Amino acid sequence: MKNNQIFSCSNCGAQFQKWVGRCLECGKWGTIDDKPQIQITKKQNNTENYALTSLSTLSSIKSENAARIKTNVNELDRVLGGGFVPGSLILLGGEPGIGKSTLALQLSSIFAHTLYLSGEESIEQIKIRSERLKINSPTLQIGNETNVEKIVATIRKIKPPMAIVDSIQTISSNEAEGEAGNITQVRACTVKLMEAAKTTGTTIILVGQVTKEGSVAGPKSLEHLVDMVLYLEGDRFHQFRILRAAKNRFGSTDEVGVFSMEENGLQEVKNPSAAFLNERSENPAGNVIACLMEGSRPILIEIQALVNKTSFGYPVRKASGFDLNRLHVLIAVLQKRAGLHLEQFDVHLNIVGGLTANEPAADLAVAMAVVGAYKDKPLGTDLAAFGEIGLSGEIRPVSFTEKRLKECEQLGLKRVITNLGNQNKPTKIKSLKVIGIKNIQDIIKHT
């Protein structure tokens, strides 16, 4: 038996072996108190007194498909896997100002008798935002509440089809210690809301803030508790938003939904490729179209590169929407395997539309954009490229080649540069000229 003295923070619950004036986890001052450590008594592990766990075989279990509630918004239903599952707990996260509350209010207007409880805004503020979004739902019930016990009691009595809590960091429980927003409070409130969702069949959506620097009490600590985690991504200075499912117990996590932030809220983009390429330039040097896969959907995006003579001794490499370390690797491969002298040139890379190109298939388009900018040679607006580049300069094949080629055909492209093996594969697309290349040296021949 041990009874050692420890110090814990009354705000976030962090524990320390010695007293400190400022909590090293949450940064609050004067919140460290000395409390006796919980006594741990070692007991003999006697398993003979416990009943056996009830077991079943796969053949004896009946497969029951959960009835889903469709939103009739194709981009949203795609991410959800066909619609909302009654009794599920969903976490909607994203950076401040990205449009989480806007999306939540739009969701509340889809279903009748939805309950919207906000701990951040007053009902007057919600009314103003609903007028801006042109939302007029006569059955929508709005309230201000930060106590989770009152929220659960309201859900149990009304039993709405959907309840939205905005946000999880602002509510607290009387049975947990600390202020609203710390780990202890957030987890305690989430567990109570999970129980309410399962017992009443109400779909509960929790809105959570995610900062770029990360937060101890952020939604990251709740991902294992909820049924689904949705993240709204994008650049707040661009109009496009990506809704991605990081966790989905009722469907796939490969699908994404594309939305556009308009004056009347988030609007679904039914043809993302056409939207991303709508404002592309005429035919500048260093611009290449890449076909990337977002889940099972091919999307065409424009990659821009700018190469100019460096003014300092060390060249500058900058990337927006692309991994900077990967850009360094591709530049090194172009220098070593293709003989490009980029050691005295600055390289700037940009993914148009505020998107992020994380797929390895973007390597070939990035390399071609850099080569085109280096040579100051336009490659044409009817050309697309996709493929992974290895360290020895080889062009590796990527998956979903047929889907990528079909998307390029629908957008009116005429040429596609990819791995050499894809050129000889049978395809039903005859209007495209598939140019196969084997290694990075072949890029120089086509740029």
Image (cartoon, rainbow, N blue to C red):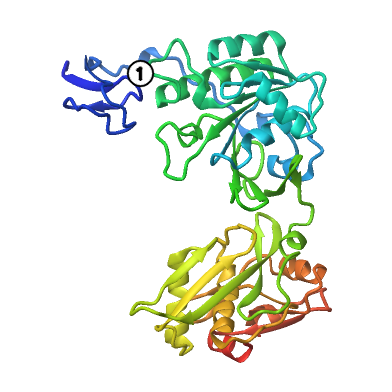
Q: Is residue 387 left or right of residue 408?
A: left
> In the figure, residue 143 lies in which quadrant?
top right
Tell how many labels.
1
Residue 392 in view, yes or no: no
Q: Is residue 223 left or right of residue 436?
A: left
Disc 1 crowd, CA 10 A, few/some/many (<14, 14-19, 20+): few
Residue 228 to residue 21: above or below? below
Closest to the observer, 61 or 418: 418
Residue at the location (74% across, 36% down)?
Answer: 83
Of the residues shown, which amino acid type is indicated by label 1? Thr
Percent x, y of residue 369: 59, 77
Is disc 1 placed on a helix, strand or loop? helix
* Residue named by callout 1: 47
Closest to the observer, 222 or 61: 222
Residue 312 to residue 71: above or below? below
Q: Is residue 93 left or right of residue 32?
A: right
Residue 74 in view, yes or no: yes
Quadrant, the N terminus: top left
Residue at the location (47% across, 24% down)?
Answer: 186
Residue at the location (76% across, 46% down)?
Answer: 268
Percent x, y of residue 267: 76, 44
Percent x, y of residue 76: 73, 41
Closest to the observer, 308 or 174: 308
Quadrant, the C terminus: bottom right
Closest to the observer, 159 or 390: 159
> In the figure, residue 401 lies in which quadrant?
bottom right
